[in-house]
Image (cartoon, grey):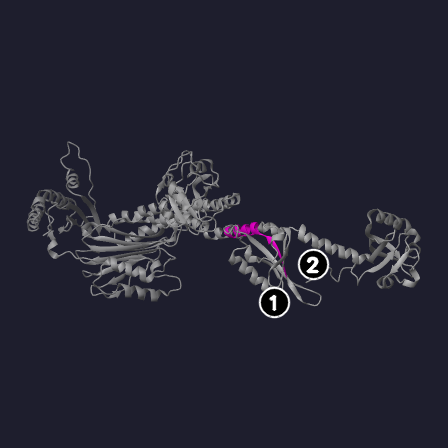
């Protein structure tokens, strides 16, 4: 093999160079055929002649003389000189001169020459080759066809830490771990077989002397061939790109972190996303500890840091959970610990080499021995700081990875922590606002519905996907006088806090109007006026609050009387209710739609329907049946299907309706109210019509006493006599016409006195000299509630008395 011997391209080779011999006087005594071809002088013309006579131009003689003198001093010479061609033109020749010693007393000189351009190119090639093997920073390895090493340069020897001469005859597997060596061998064989070069292929290159240390190289390879095409081997160029590889991985990790961290507005989820990104790419274990107020959405104090709550942890080290503080637990760190300094100084801390448990913030100090047993050897702590607030810190440690953390790792972790901190602070702020919104919702919507003798109720409220988690839909169950109940469902345009605030005002208004015992259509008329005024207020304030939505609403108001079993309803631009008969059949009553609330000046019409005991009245808002992409008739059919049937509680029916009709993320708020009717037995109601005469009060007392005795409420006779006497007497004096007395036994004892007058009784404080004026004061003291409602033909004054604790209605 002539891989590194004289090559045919050598201009000074025997076949390529012009040769001549001169004696000590400069006379030509030898002339080669190649010299004759290059310079045109035939041997018979030059032998015996001084070379300077025919080979050197007169103008070049001084230069040639200096070269000859240098040759004599050094006993040899190499350089470029101008030489005359036989036809008289000058030729630049590269000349190499060597002294030939013989037994004669005088030496002769052997000259080898070639065109200067060829010599310079050849010398450049030799210089490049020498530089590749001696000074090149890029590794170079030459392999025989069987992939044994023929020669390596100093750079590749430096990568492996092996002298170049010790690599000859070895294979790659003698220096690299088997997995990496097999990869490189396979790729080099492919180059040998196909002749296609390999360009900048990146691969792992772990040394047998340090198998745990990651190293990556970029390899280019090409096949070696001689002038006849015979394969001589393969050469590979190797460059250590470990730092570049790590930089790309870090950049990719940063990009991944941007996509994976902060996908929700939940503090705990964001913390878990952070540790998922960090492990195992950067650390063997990562934990996130947040100052306790942060988890609740509160702003943490920066004066003295309190305990931290562990929000997330992830580890690839077996049994690490034995030394880690549990997620959700509180941890206290002393100010002089690395953790305390990380919080107080708001800067990352690197403990590259852990000694004696110092810096093991991933474990409690009392568990440091257990951490040491796991092999924890390097720790980083990075604060989670955003908008000038320290929210907590992230801890990372290594046990399996033998390399300690370095400054680049700390910079990367700090970048992750900065991004995560902003997300966590956003989640904290959202949590605070969300809790405030939920608190507002709890105040605006009814909490526990009252237990009523008239109906058994169940409800569902599902806000749309608004950030605040509240909406403008509402429902209400309002006890009325006479054991009646008002059932209300309403819908304010829009979502969020604006709609919720308007809803709260409307709900308050409904409660106030319900206390007046108005008919449903009258309640809606008053609400219409209120919404109209609210819309006018918003238009005035639109310059200060341009994002406020214009107020508009719909409402369905129903009053059910368990004594008569009848229900009065009216609606304002709201979907009609569904009625479920005791047999489970569903219908939608023909109830006049009415205009939406806020248009102003348009009338509302009411309807009265009879509801047998056990009927279900279903009131709902638009969001239940107006879902995106669904036909409203199909939605009403599905609602009818889910409500039909019997032998189910109203709670089960409400859940079934919501699950069947609503998507996972509804686009509109939904309120659903189901009420199963009850009818008071006839023996629980007693009604008498009394003549408008002075004896009416006495007759009323007698009738009342007899009825209370039947109901086994004799203990309530005395107080009820005073109430009945006062109310009947007032009706006789100021009302005119017949007087009606009605007693109702339900959860309480209800006493009602009706007359044809519209004059309302007033409670006042009587002076000591007044003969009257104390009756209603006594009534107020003896009852739980009392009031007045008006009808088309007069008024009714009513009272409610609590039953004795041990008294069960008979």
Task: Where is residue 134? Give x, y as percent.
Answer: 67, 51
**As drawn, is 270 to the left or to the right of 48?**
left
Task: Where is residue 10? Give x, y as percent.
Answer: 76, 59
Query: What's drawn in magenta, residue-wise?
Result: 234-253
Q: Is residue 478 visible?
A: yes
Q: Vertical placement of 188 versus 362: above or below?
A: below
Label 1: state its secondary structure. helix
Q: Vertical placement of 268 versus 34: above or below?
A: above
Q: Which residue is mark 1?
A: 193
Instruction: Farthest residue to the top: give it.
Output: 768
Crowding near the residue tagged with mark 2, few <14, some 14–19, many ≥20 C-alpha atoms within 10 Å: few
Which residue is nearer to you in this view: 734 or 230?
230
Q: Which residue is mark 2?
A: 4
Answer whether residue 243 is magenta in the image. yes
Task: Where is residue 183? Give x, y as percent.
Answer: 54, 60
Assign the magenta stretch its main secondary structure.
helix
Closer to viewer: mark 1 or mark 2:
2
């Amino acid at each position: 093999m002539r891989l590194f011997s004289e090559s045919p391209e050598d201009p000074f080779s025997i076949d390529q160079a012009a040769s001549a011999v001169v004696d000590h006087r400069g006379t030509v005594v030898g002339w080669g055929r190649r010299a004759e071809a290059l310079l045109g002088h035939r041997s018979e013309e030059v032998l015996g002649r001084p070379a300077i006579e025919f080979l050197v131009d007169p103008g070049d003689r001084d230069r040639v003389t200096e070269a000859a003198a240098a040759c004599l001093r050094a006993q040899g010479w190499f350089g470029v000189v101008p030489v005359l061609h036989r036809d008289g033109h000058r030729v630049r020749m590269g000349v190499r001169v060597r002294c030939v010693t013989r037994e004669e007393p005088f030496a002769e000189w052997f000259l080898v020459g070639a065109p200067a351009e060829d010599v310079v190119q050849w010398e450049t090639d030799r210089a490049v080759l020498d530089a590749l093997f001696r000074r090149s920073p890029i590794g170079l390895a030459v392999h025989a066809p069987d992939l044994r090493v023929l020669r390596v340069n100093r750079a590749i020897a430096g990568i492996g830490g092996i002298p170049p001469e010790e690599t000859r005859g070895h294979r790659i597997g003698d220096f690299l771990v088997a997995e990496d060596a097999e990869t490189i061998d396979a790729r080099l064989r492919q180059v040998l077989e196909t002749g296609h070069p390999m360009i900048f292929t990146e691969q792992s290159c772990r040394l047998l002397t340090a198998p745990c240390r990651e190293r990556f190289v970029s390899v280019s390879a090409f096949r070696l061939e001689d002038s006849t095409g015979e394969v001589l081997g393969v050469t590979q160029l190797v460059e250590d790109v470990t730092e570049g590889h790590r930089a790309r991985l870090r950049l990719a990790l940063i990009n991944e972190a941007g996509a994976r961290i902060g996908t929700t507005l939940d503090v705990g989820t964001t913390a878990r996303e952070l540790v998922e990104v960090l492990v195992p790419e950067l650390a063997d274990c990562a934990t996130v500890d947040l100052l306790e107020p942060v988890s609740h959405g509160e702003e943490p104090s920066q004066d003295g840091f309190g305990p931290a709550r562990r929000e997330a942890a992830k580890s690839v080290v077996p049994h690490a959970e034995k030394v880690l503080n549990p997620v959700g637990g509180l941890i206290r760190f002393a100010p002089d610990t690395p953790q305390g300094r990380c919080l107080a100084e708001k800067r990352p801390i690197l403990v590259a080499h852990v000694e004696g448990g110092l810096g093991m913030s991933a474990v409690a100090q009392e568990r440091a021995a257990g951490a040491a047993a796991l092999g924890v050897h390097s720790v980083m702590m990075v604060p989670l700081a955003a908008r000038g607030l320290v929210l907590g810190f992230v801890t990372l440690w290594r046990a399996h990875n033998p390399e300690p953390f370095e400054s680049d790792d700390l910079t990367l972790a700090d970048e992750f922590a900065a991004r995560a901190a902003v997300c966590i602070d956003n989640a904290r702020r959202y949590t605070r606002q969300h809790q405030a919104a939920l608190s507002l919702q709890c105040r605006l919507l009814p909490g526990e519905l009252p237990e009523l003798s008239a109906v058994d109720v169940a409800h569902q409220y599902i806000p749309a996907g608004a950030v605040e988690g509240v909406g403008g839909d509402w429902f209400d169950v309002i006890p009325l006088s006479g054991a009646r109940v008002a059932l209300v469902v309403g819908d304010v345009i829009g979502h969020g806090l604006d709609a919720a605030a308007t809803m709260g005002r409307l709900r308050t208004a409904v409660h106030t109007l319900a206390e007046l015992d108005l008919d449903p259509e009258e309640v809606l008329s008053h609400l219409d006026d209120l919404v109209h005024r609210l819309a006018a207020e918003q238009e005035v304030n639109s310059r200060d609050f341009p994002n406020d939505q214009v107020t508009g609403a719909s409402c369905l108001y129903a009053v059910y009387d368990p004594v008569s079993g009848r229900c009065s309803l009216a609606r304002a631009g709201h979907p009609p209710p569904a009625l479920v008969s005791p047999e489970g059949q569903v219908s939608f009553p023909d109830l006049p739609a009415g205009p939406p609330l806020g248009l102003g000046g348009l009338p509302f019409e009411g309807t009265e329907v009879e509801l047998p005991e056990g009927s279900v009245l279903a009131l709902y808002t638009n969001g239940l049946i107006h879902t995106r992409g669904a036909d409203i008739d199909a939605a009403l059919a599905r609602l009818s299907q889910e409500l039909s049937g019997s032998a189910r509680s109203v709670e089960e029916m409400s859940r079934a309706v919501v699950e069947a009709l609503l998507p996972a993320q509804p686009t509109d708020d939904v309120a659903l109210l189901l009420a199963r009717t009850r009818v008071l037995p006839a023996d629980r109601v007693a009604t008498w019509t009394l003549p408008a005469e002075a004896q009416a009060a006495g007759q009323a007392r007698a009738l009342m006493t007899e009825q209370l005795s039947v109901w086994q409420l004799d203990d309530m006779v005395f107080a009820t006599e005073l109430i009945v006497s006062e109310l009947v007497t007032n009706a006789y004096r100021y009302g005119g016409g017949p007087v009606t007395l009605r007693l109702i036994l339900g959860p309480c004892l209800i006493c009602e006195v009706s007359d044809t007058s519209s004059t309302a009784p007033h409670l006042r404080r009587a002076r000591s000299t007044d003969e009257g004026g104390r009756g209603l004061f006594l009534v107020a003291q003896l009852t739980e509630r009392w009031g007045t409602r008006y009808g088309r033909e007069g008024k009714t004054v009513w009272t409610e008395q609590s039953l004795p604790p041990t008294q069960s209605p008979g």
